[in-house]
Amino acid sequence: MEKIVRAIAVDDEPMALEILERHARGVAWLALQRTFISASEAMMWLRENPVDVVFLDIRMPDVNGLELASELTGTHQFIFTTAFADHATAAFDLHAIDYLLKPFSEQRFKTACERVLDRMKSQPQAAPEQVSHLFIKSGYDLVRIDLNKLLFVQSADNYLVFHEPGRQTVGRMTLTSIQERLPAARFMRIHHSYIVSLTHVERLEDGVMVIGRYRLPVSLKYRKEVLSRFK
């Protein structure tokens, strides 16, 4: 029995999604769980509902498919479904499994799905790639945060402030939700209002962590864990 492959599809054209759903019904081991006309909505859904493969259009109004794929690299496989051939190089640079040019036949779709299985079988123990960035919702935009540059995240009422050198980005979310998305080996919580990048810590003083010009409080709740990380 073949492994069930979980999938979603993202395309701003409802007709394109209907065709893809019809093709998916012809692949017994493919479970198309959801379809989305908005890339940003798909991205938020995937944070809580990981799948094996994402079928992804490129030219969409809110977030284009290449941007979404860059966020998914290392955590999801993806197949591009587009009417434009000129993005193929960029797609395969992002390790896409396949690149389907619309209109594509049911057989061509099945071939792409078989490639998903082939890759999953060839990399059964593949380690996930190190996360280098994430996208956060800031107003009506999705803003890329470079984790190598991120100094710390600060909670302020119902918002978070992402501090990078020369830039602050504000997003409406909780500190706990963003902590779950940050690599635990590189980031840690030091206070109910702060998550810091361990890479950028310059020194520890009595109850204070120094990152550049910032002096951040380390609460008693986290002090023992903080000290153990710096032994």
Image (cartoon, rainbow, N blue to C red):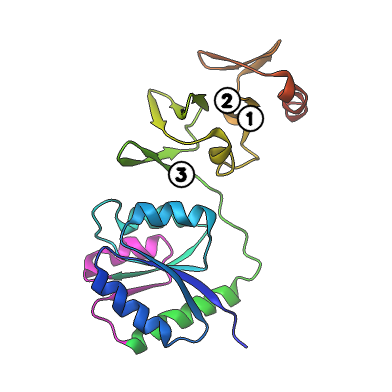
Task: Residue 134: give its label.
Answer: 3
Residue 131 highlighted magenta (yes or no): no
- What residue do we see at 24% from left, 76% from top? 102
Q: Which residue is mark 2?
A: 194
Cβ–Cβ under 8 Å for marks 1 and 2 = yes
Amino acid at the residue labelled 3 = Leu
Along the viewing direction, whichever of 200 and 174 lies nearer the viewer? 174
Residue 53 % position (x, y) = 47, 69
Give the spatial CA distance, label 2 vs label 3.
18 Å
State the CA–CA distance, disc 1 to disc 2.
6 Å
- Position of residue 5 relative to residue 62, above or below, is below
Label 2 neighbour load within 10 Å: few <14, some 14-19, many 20+: many
Q: Secondary structure at mark 1?
A: strand
Which label is found at residue 89? Answer: none
Query: Which amino acid is tagged 1?
Result: Arg
Tell me the distance, in whole angstroms, between the alpha carbons under discs 1 and 3.
18 Å
Q: Quadrant of the N terminus?
A: bottom right
